[in-house]
Image: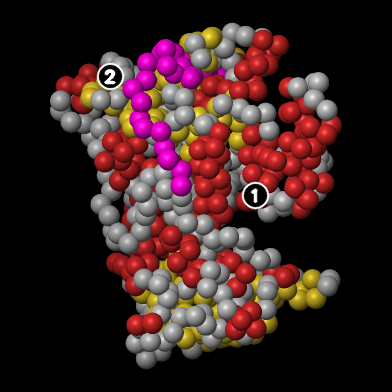
Amino acid sequence: MTTHPPTQTVDDATGLLALDQVVKHFDISGGLLDQLRFQNGRIIRQRTTVKAVNNVSFTIAPGETFSVVGESGCGKSTLARTTIGIYPPNRGQIHYRGERIDNKNSQEMLPFRRKMQMIFQDPYASLNPRKTVLQTLEEPVVFHNPAITRGQVRERVHEVMSQVGVDPKWAGRYPHEFSGGQRQRISIARALMVDPEFIVADEPVSALDVSIQAQILNLLMDAQAQRGLTYMFITHDLSVVEHISTRVAVMYLGTLCELSPAKTLFERPRHPYTQALLSAIPKLGKRKSVHIKLKGEVPTPIDLPTGCVFHGRCVHANQRCVKEIPETRTVENDVMVACHAVEEGRL
Amino acid sequence: MSHLLEVKDLEVKFGLRFGDLTAINGVSFALDRGERMGLVGESGAGKSVTGFAIINLISKPGFISGGKVMFNGQDLATLSDEAMREIRGNQISMIFQDPMMTLNPVLTIGTQMLETLLAHRNISRDEAAAIALEKLRKVQIPSPEKRLAQYPHQFSGGMRQRIVIAIALLTDPEIIIADEPTTALDVTIQAEIMDLLQQLCESEQTGLILITHDLGVVSQVTEKIAVMYAGKIVEAGPTDKVIQKPRHPYTQGLIKALPGSLQPGAKLNQIPGMMPTLTDIPPGCAFNPRCYMCDTICREQEPPFVHIDGDTCQVACHMVKPDSSNGTK
């Protein structure tokens, strides 16, 4: 039985990982010629940026499962990759155990990379098809501990493989010889090889069938209980989130709308977007649930709406929402919401 | 009383170098006018192949090797290509998972809609355009007149799936087969599309076969359900009954494996192992190596698909006794 650590009140001093006003934009304007536009009889140069993550701040406490949810294109995967250092942020700071890591070069990052590992969504794409399982699992250990002997590496591979439920006898096989669930176990094993403290899992069960999904979630929860791991869990599957998370951050269009302990969020969602999102989950045995219908469609992250990014689809929006970007405020114990309506008590 | 669609002992094989693989092995079910049915199971269970077999669209090396698909008194499995084309896309429409793959990216929505109508109806282009507009309104596409002249890439994922539904509705079909229609969509859009499908099927009295792996969606939209495993239906019955009191150990496992029914953080109930590949389906009951109450008979004999609970639910399991009192728990 996995026990979850109780929800902690987190401040910057106790946090394992802290993001402060992190911004990640992607320039997709292409070469110089692609940037030129003809407008009002003149040629102008125009840059196009995808504003994937905008001023996101949060702190992850040691031992917790911090989930980020949102619909496709909301920037949750970009946030995960920025957090772990795959993408450098455009602005803002990332601290790991109090030390700033976003401005470190790759040499200085090495000790942190050992502590932070990532599991990707598609186990078909994230394992090198031309390497055996043994080679895949050996690489990170040898890379981070050049002094280690072959025997020790083998032993470690053996140990981790049995732990994730893949028979160590199969170490000489290639990824294509395994099923999707087995491959995801191998991806998890690869992340566990270097004994990390913090694992970012980007949709680790989305590509799997229900019965296999349960196996992998159990494995992740067991690994957490045994090793005291901290997870940042990216997913769009809200029932999975409700089951495994300590705290949940809801993202919409690159912005954090709400950050609450999982139980509170599912019992009493505050942000209008969270309310709509939760009402849309199909529940077993509940016929024709009434879900909150949103107006319009998700705007593009290239032209962000003014004010609150959600105002165009929100039934509670007023003039202030159109003009002013809502700040993330703590409304009650550990519940943080970025919404003018909540702040003004209209909602 | 005869059913709108009756699938009887359907068998689909794929001819490969080393012999025939049986993808669908004796699937039977019936659908009445306006009835909504869910076909659920995990990947590789044969749900999609069943859907394709109904409209006789199994491509080589696959073929329908046995059984009947009775629709309005005709056996679709033996119909000529010519005759089948009259029914496919006309009386029986299909909606696929990925709307971007279904729609032709180089033709406008209008062209694609008129094409479908003119292929099946002897009407003028103007009349066809009027029908297309009416159907776009039905699926709640804003300003349909303008939208008809646009290309698929100008629509969002949810809008594209609405258009696919509008195309499926063009010829007022009697049955719509929807193969994972919302799997590629976000939850908020999924909820809207499912509402829409359900409303349309109710108002037009269209039969719906909803193929999906998502038990939540099935339990909201359908009236009856068939659970497939390794090419066979292992349990079927009214949706509420099957979801609330699953009898087959596989159905039980599927429902229990869903997070949400448990205390957060608790260990999820997992089904050990995985679905067998078609090349090595175990003898006896195909589920036996993963089953928690497997017995000798399960390894030796294929379980019959029998009625329990009076007449409504059917289960293929040796361990479920016809008398509901000492059935499985």
Q: Is residue B28 left or right of residue A59?
A: right
* The magenta segment: A1-30
Marks 1 and 2 sit apart, C-alpha to C-alpha, by 43 Å
Q: Decide whether the magenta segment is chiefly helix, strand or loop.
A: loop
Q: Provide the secondary structure element on which disc 2 rests.
A: strand
Label 2 neighbour load within 10 Å: few <14, some 14-19, many 20+:
some
Q: Quadrant of residue A131?
A: top right
For label 1, the residue is A165
Verify whether residue A113 appears in magenta.
no
Q: Nearer the viewer, mark 1 or mark 2?
A: 1
**Where residue B170 sits in the image (x, y, percent)?**
43, 63
Q: Residue at x 80, y 76 (%)?
A: B19
* Display colour scheme: secondary structure
Q: Is residue B62 visible?
A: no
Chain for numbered disc 2: A
Where disc 1 sits, the SS reads loop
Is residue B285 left or right of B123 when viewed as pictured? Answer: right
Q: Is residue B67 left or right of residue A282?
A: right
User: Disc 1 marks which amino acid?
Assistant: Gly
Amino acid type shown at disc 2: Arg
In the displayed structure, B197 sits above or below A34; it is below
Which residue is at the front of the view, A141 or B33? A141
Image check: B15 left or right of B110?
right
